Amino acid sequence: MPASISKTTVSRVQTRSQTRAEAQPTFDPKNSLRKRDVKTAVKPATRSKEAHTTVRTTKNVRTRASRASKGVARLAVAQKLTPQAKPNDAREETPASTPEISSCSSPGNNPVSGDDETPYEEAYLAEQRRAAISDLHDIVTVDGSCLKDFYKAAASDRRIKNFLTASALYDYGTNTWTGISREVRDEKTLRASLVKVIKTIVAGLGNMKGSREVVDTHHTAFPHCEEASQTSKPSISIKATGPSFSEPWVPQGAKRVPNATGFSNVATVFEVKRDVDATEAAVDQLAVYNRQIFFHQLNRLFCRSLLLTETQVRLLHCDRSGAYKTTAVNIHDNPCTFVRLVLGLSSPHETVLGLDSTVQWTVKDGMKVAGTITTVNDSGKRIKYQLRMDEPHAVRRTVRSRGTVCWNAMDKNGKRILLKDAWRLDDQVPEYTFLERAKGVAGVAQMFAYEDNRVQTKTLRPECFDFEASDFHNRTMSRVTMACYGSSLDRFTSQRQAIAALRDAIQGAHTSHIAGVMHRDVSMDNILLGDNDAAIGERGVLIDLDMAMVVDGPTAGMLTEYRVVCELLSIISEYIRIGLHQPLHCPRDYLDDLESFFYVLCHLLHGFEGVNLPDPLAFQGLAILAQWEQDRLPATYSKANYLDEAERGPRPIPTFWSSACIGLRDRFRKFILPIGDAKTDIRNARDSKVQSKLLQGLVQWA
């Protein structure tokens, strides 16, 4: 079965905070949080042509964070899948996924072999690059001279020179690789030459003990994680075995190919082009490969790959802050640099490759059969847990993001627990801060321990990188050990269960607010079902406090610097000046979270025709939920009309829902409406002191 699943609710109404959580802030983080004693890149930085941008330097350019992931990786235990279940049977979260291409144009659906095969069409590759860059944002270019400092521990210059001389791979008289002609006429010959040279380097200096193999994969279609019919064909791959690698997953009915190579069992990949074809698009294709390696290898911290020509090498690096690529370095003039790049990217040490060695698996016959994850307990001592192999791990299908991975595990007593890995921005308060305050609060996820500052992305960049660039934001990885709960709210098994879960989640939000925590990201995705025998108060659990804030009173902290606004909130969460599309800054309080719960209820009533029966038309045409997924301004007006009972949509609520549920919606609406009207009036007041006074009165009234 697949090792992971990325989940999102069938009903797709999203909150602005879910989008905002994945997008970088549009302001520069505090200077005090920036690394100062570093050099800045002097080479011009570029984005690919597919991104429709021009050449620029890495400084003084502000890029807008593009709309990112819909949905948030849940802390839910995913529904059990049978060992033969197809990955596509799961609901995938693919906001920046590889675009769908018709089967007639998709090379992955027409497998061929040999060097005379029809290559991928450029339009097909261009769409893949656009998807990758949409995820990674601006791929800046840094000076390739930094590569001379990469992987210094792999081998000394003297050792490399002695090896190259003894093996006759390199001619120090003419300063050329003897097996790589500068006058190569075709890519096939060049690829064969590079495979031979790289194999010799790995065998002679790598000390791999059979764990790494250089494979020509230009004719091998690597299926993508989002859709198996979408594929890539890296020119050369470093096939790997070890505790983090497994052979490509084979769906039910498909024949397993012995010793197959795919994104799940490569240490890195190389793209081969002649100098004349080594365009920016060619190096950007590496971003497609790196991104898929991230998705197939869940314990990846960073990923690197190379573009090789008859004279040059370029490197592309991806991590949770995005990506960078280097300018070209001449491999004939810098043989030691080239050798160290090969050795480093094929290293037998998984930490050197960019893998998190605290997550390891036992691999049998090419498949992962058991695993462990190591962290700290509440006393700060190292502790190892067994991974649950019968349940997929919830992951976020984006690279430049929080990179959430939720590992399902068991403690020594066999009790289910969950370990959540996530990468936060410097300006964000760690989630464990809020979970600590919410300890003992029924209806809110409970934390057992946390491990902070595991990795920072700024430590993964070379010294020449411009850390002041507007599009770079350092992220810090943390791991939180938590209680494990049931499925998400959309997996309800009865009306009673759904409404009870919603009620207890509302109670949890209220109690946590009293404890000093305001959630600010209430949505269908962030409410889990309690256990079947859960007591009142624990039938629904509010999770994902990444976007929460500390409050000390009814209105304290409402003017927050790191502002996150839910897209489902209409007139309460944000006001709009007539004639303008730019929202004004607005305070936020627990009443905003309360309206979010109202929209979750509407999400249930309008989005489902029954148990496990999402309404197929709920997000089409003029349906209410479809209107709420429009751009911010029309969605806001639609929700305002809904609250005012002037609009109920062209389709009635499915008959599955009882009159009691519909009555609850109406009573909830009548409670929310006057609060929204009052807030609109308050926000129209020009005097901030008047606003504050009126808002205090509203909160006390509500």
Image: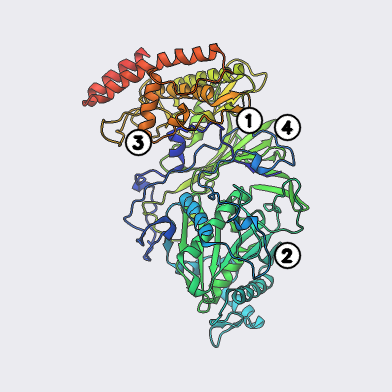
Q: Dot 3: what SS?
A: loop
Q: Is residue 517 depicted above or below 255 in this figure?
A: above
| Numbered badge on residue 377 | none
Q: Where does label 1 land, which residue?
A: 484
> How many angstroms separate mark 4 from mark 3 (CA)?
43 Å
Q: Is residue 587 depicted above or below 194 in this figure?
A: above
> How many angstroms separate mark 3 from mark 2 (CA)?
53 Å
Visible residue check, residue 321: no
> How many angstroms separate mark 4 from mark 1 (CA)?
12 Å
Q: Reading the chain from its start, which is encountered first: label 2 or label 1?
A: 2
Q: Where does label 4 land, which residue?
A: 414
> How many angstroms separate mark 4 from mark 2 (CA)?
36 Å
Q: Is residue 420 depicted above or below 655 in this figure?
A: below
Q: Crowding at label 1, few (<14), some or many (≥20) Cα neighbours within 10 Å?
A: many
Q: Dot 2: what SS?
A: loop
Q: Residue at x 54, y 44 (%)?
A: 94
Q: Dot 4: what SS?
A: loop
